[in-house]
């Protein structure tokens, strides 16, 4: 069976040398509202070639970017170097969260859906820290991503353990969530 790492390395190899993609509009909107990162720790999970890690780093967050694909992380580092920002990378298979992770003030998950991961995301945040999710829903036109990687309608409005919703948006086949870890959790 082909692993996530092999499958995604092959896909990322095809895009090697392309400029960094622009950030997802919902993620960009929340990053703008959060204001300067002032050195706060941020995690970009399943970061790909780093479109959100790069913007967060440019806004002053101390970013660690995780992906299962070393090829993606290599491209991220090239983009970061070209843009004069620093991003730490870590090869992580998100089917198992690394146990030695200090919590962050910001966690971003874009265009990646693993429903087993969602209930564990609060544990990656400091109290008051922000989680930003943005991805495809069943209403997204076109064949990709396949059905199992699409959210149901309204799925991001369901409660996540220890988190309170700040904003949820849905439309045009995309959904976004900004939530904060409860101060008392
Ligand atoms: C559609 S891309 C999204 C990349 C990035 N978040 C963005 O918005 O541009 C999905 C990413 O998930 C990564 N990925 C797939 N399975 C993974 C896993 N089990 N653990 C960590 N990353 C994974 C892939 O390598 C790929 O970079």
Image: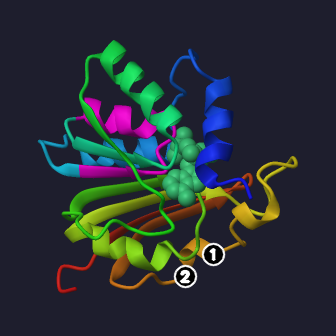
| Secondary structure found at label 2 | loop
Q: CA distance from mark 1 to mark 2?
A: 6 Å
Q: Quadrant of residue 65?
A: top left
Q: Verify CB contact (< 8 Å) between mark 1 and mark 2.
A: yes
- Residue 139, given in percent of the width and then of the height, sits at 80, 60
**For mark 1, what is the residue?**
155
Within-10-Å neighbours for mark 2: few <14, some 14–19, many 20+: few
Within-10-Å neighbours for mark 1: few <14, some 14–19, many 20+: few
| Residue 111 visible within the image | no
Q: Is 147 on the left-hand or right-hand side of 45? A: right
- Residue 184, given in percent of the width and then of the height, sits at 17, 86
Residue numbers of the magenta segment: 42-59
Q: Which mark is residue 158?
A: 2
Image height of 67 relative to 20, above or below:
below
| Residue 184 visible within the image | yes
| Secondary structure found at label 1 | helix
Image height of 38 relative to 182, above or below:
above
Q: Nearer the viewer, residue 126 or 164?
A: 126
Q: Is mark 2 within 8 Å of ligand 1?
A: no
Q: Which mark is residue 172?
A: none
Residue at image x 50%, y 23%? 20
Residue at image x 26%, y 17%? 84
């Amino acid at each position: 069976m082909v692993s996530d790492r092999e499958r995604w390395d092959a896909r990322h190899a095809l895009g090697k040398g392309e400029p960094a993609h622009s950030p997802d509009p919902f993620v960009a909107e929340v990053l703008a509202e959060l204001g300067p990162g002032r050195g706060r720790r941020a995690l970009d999970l399943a970061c790909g070639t780093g479109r959100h890690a790069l913007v967060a780093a440019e806004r002053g967050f101390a970013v660690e970017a995780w992906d299962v694909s070393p090829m993606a992380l290599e491209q991220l580092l090239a983009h970061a170097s070209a843009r004069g920002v620093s991003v730490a990378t870590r090869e992580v298979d998100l089917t198992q969260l690394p146990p030695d992770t200090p919590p962050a003030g910001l966690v971003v998950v874009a265009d990646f859906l693993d429903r087993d991961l969602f209930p564990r995301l609060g544990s990656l945040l400091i109290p008051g820290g922000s989680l930003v999710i943005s991805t495809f829903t069943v209403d997204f036109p076109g064949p990709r991503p396949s059905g199992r990687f699409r959210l149901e309608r309204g799925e991001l409005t369901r409660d996540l353990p220890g988190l309170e919703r700040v904003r949820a948006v849905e439309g045009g086949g995309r959904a976004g969530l900004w939530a904060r870890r409860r101060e008392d959790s």
